[in-house]
Image (cartoon, rainbow, N blue to C red):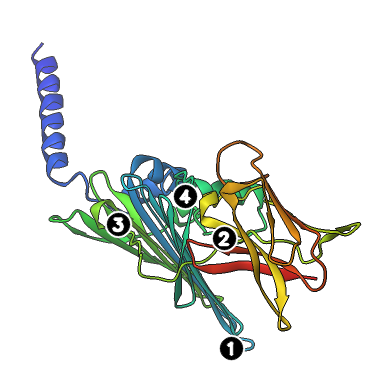
């Protein structure tokens, strides 16, 4: 009986001691504990991170170097979301063999900011639908596996089993783990209790390449939306070649499937172009929202405009058809003027 009591007492004391130690330092990792995290299939699951966090930013940088010809290349991604404000950002910069491509798209409700190089432009969407950019990229990569997408499928289990040197900051619960073998050098950043991976740096010692991934959560994730930049017109235009039916010229355009930047019809003018002193000038104009409509110009020619709203949403959207017909002769044309952007979407003539 005495022996049983001693055993029970030792078990209880052991539990209390472990619990006290865990309350103080259980978030600190040793090499074995870190390898346990890395071997977990969900150690770095971007979709889970996105599902669990309203604000998230993930940046990656992949750099390669060819010792054969000295060529360098890099691909940088910056993807962020703010579910509270319903804002998203997808940015990509590629530098490869002298080719430079640097783009960014910020979506915030009915506003879009688009950057090409250093030039920013503003677009709009009359029927916005917020989409998580991390989910969107996952769907796109599944549908088109050969496309160019962020390396968010990176699997940290490739580091499991390495021997780690780990430093920890009790104030911030930040931990930095470093390790190296004959092939790679790795730096991992973890934070929180329990610890979660928020940064990866890997250097391939054999082929002179590197990879970096950084995760930012919470209030520090800010997505800026600008209003002080040039507006870009809608991409809807008439085809260059009209139909010729007897003495009638007809231009017809159909909004393609997948077109998601819907436009209010009262922001679009359909313009009939006529020749004046060997120059094409507007002869008649229609607000798209006024269609169907027929106008006779100053020269006695009639112009007829029709807008077929395919889904009845009251917006210029996927599947809609816009037609301009006329019996005018000579050099004539058709154009689409975007009132919101104060610019031509496009003009054609015959």
Helix, strand or loop at disc 4? helix
Mark 1 and mark 3 lie on one chain; the one further toward the N terminus is 1
Callout 3: few (<14), some (14-19), or many (20+) C-alpha neighbours within 10 Å? some
Could you tell me how far apart the alpha carbons at marks 4 and 1 are, in whole angstroms?
Answer: 35 Å
Q: Nearer the viewer, residue 317 or 293?
A: 293
Q: Position of residue 129 (x, y in %)?
A: 47, 43
> How many angstroms separate mark 2 from mark 1 (CA)?
43 Å
Look at mark 4 in the image and give the residue it sits on.
134
Estimate the spatial distance between the alpha carbons at disc 1 and disc 3, rounded to whole Å.
37 Å
Q: Earlier in the sequence, mark 4 or mark 1?
A: 1
- Above or below residue 150? Residue 68 is below
Whether tag 1 and tag 3 are in contact, CB under 8 A, the answer is: no
Residue plotted at (40% across, 45% down):
50
Decide: marks 2, 1 in contact (CB < 8 A)? Answer: no
Determine which quarter of the picture holds residue 313. Answer: top right
Residue 159 has which mark? none
Residue in the image at 45% along x and 54% along y: 156
Q: Earlier in the sequence, mark 2 or mark 3?
A: 3
Calculate the distance from the C-alpha at mark 2 to the C-alpha at mark 3. 30 Å
Q: Which residue is mark 1?
A: 70
Q: Is residue 23 above or below residue 324?
A: above
Badge number at residue 234: 2
Q: Quadrant of the C terminus?
A: bottom right
Badge 2 element:
loop
Q: Quadrant of the N terminus?
A: top left
Label 2 crowd bin: few (<14), some (14–19), many (20+), radius 10 Å: many
Q: Which residue is mark 3?
A: 221
Instruction: Report x, y in % for residue 189.
Output: 31, 60
Q: Which numbered mark, 4 or 2, is in the foreground of this view?
A: 2
Whether residue 166 is visible to the viewer of this picture, yes or no, is yes
Pointers 4 and 1 in contact (C-beta within 8 Å): no
Sort mark 4 into few (<14), some (14-19) or many (20+) by Cα contacts within 10 Å: many
């Amino acid at each position: 009986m005495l022996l049983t009591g001693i055993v029970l007492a030792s078990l209880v004391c052991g539990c209390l001691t472990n619990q006290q130690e865990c309350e103080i330092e259980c978030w600190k990792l040793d090499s074995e504990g870190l390898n346990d995290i890395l071997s977990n299939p969900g150690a770095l699951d971007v979709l889970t991170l996105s599902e669990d966090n309203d604000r998230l930013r993930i940046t990656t940088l992949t750099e390669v170097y060819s010792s054969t010809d000295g060529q360098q290349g890099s691909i940088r991604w910056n993807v962020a979301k703010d579910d509270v404000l319903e804002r998203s950002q997808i940015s990509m910069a590629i530098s490869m063999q002298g080719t430079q491509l640097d783009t960014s798209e910020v979506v915030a409700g009915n506003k879009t900011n688009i950057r090409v190089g250093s030039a920013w432009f503003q677009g709009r969407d009359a029927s916005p639908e917020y989409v998580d950019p991390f989910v969107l990229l996952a769907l796109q990569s599944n549908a088109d596996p050969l496309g160019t997408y962020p390396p968010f499928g990176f699997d940290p289990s490739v580091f499991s089993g390495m021997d780690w040197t780990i430093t920890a900051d009790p104030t911030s619960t930040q931990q930095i783990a470093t390790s190296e073998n004959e092939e790679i050098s790795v730096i991992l950043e973890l934070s929180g209790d329990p610890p979660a991976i928020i940064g990866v740096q890997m250097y391939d010692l054999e082929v002179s390449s590197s990879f970096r991934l950084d995760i930012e959560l919470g209030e520090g994730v800010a997505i800026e939306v600008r209003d002080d930049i040039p507006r870009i017109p809608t991409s809807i235009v008439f085809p260059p070649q009209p139909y010729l039916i007897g003495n009638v010229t007809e231009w017809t355009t159909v909004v393609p499937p997948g077109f998601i930047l819907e436009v209010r019809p009262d922001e679009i003018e359909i313009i009939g172009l006529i020749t004046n002193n060997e120059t094409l000038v507007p002869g008649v104009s229609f607000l798209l929202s006024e269609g169907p409509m027929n106008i006779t110009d100053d020269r006695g020619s009639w112009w007829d405009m029709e807008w077929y709203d395919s889904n009845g949403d009251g917006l210029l959207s996927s599947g809609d058809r816009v037609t301009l017909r006329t019996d005018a002769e000579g050099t004539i044309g058709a154009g689409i003027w975007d009132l919101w952007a104060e610019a031509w979407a496009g003009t054609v003539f015959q």
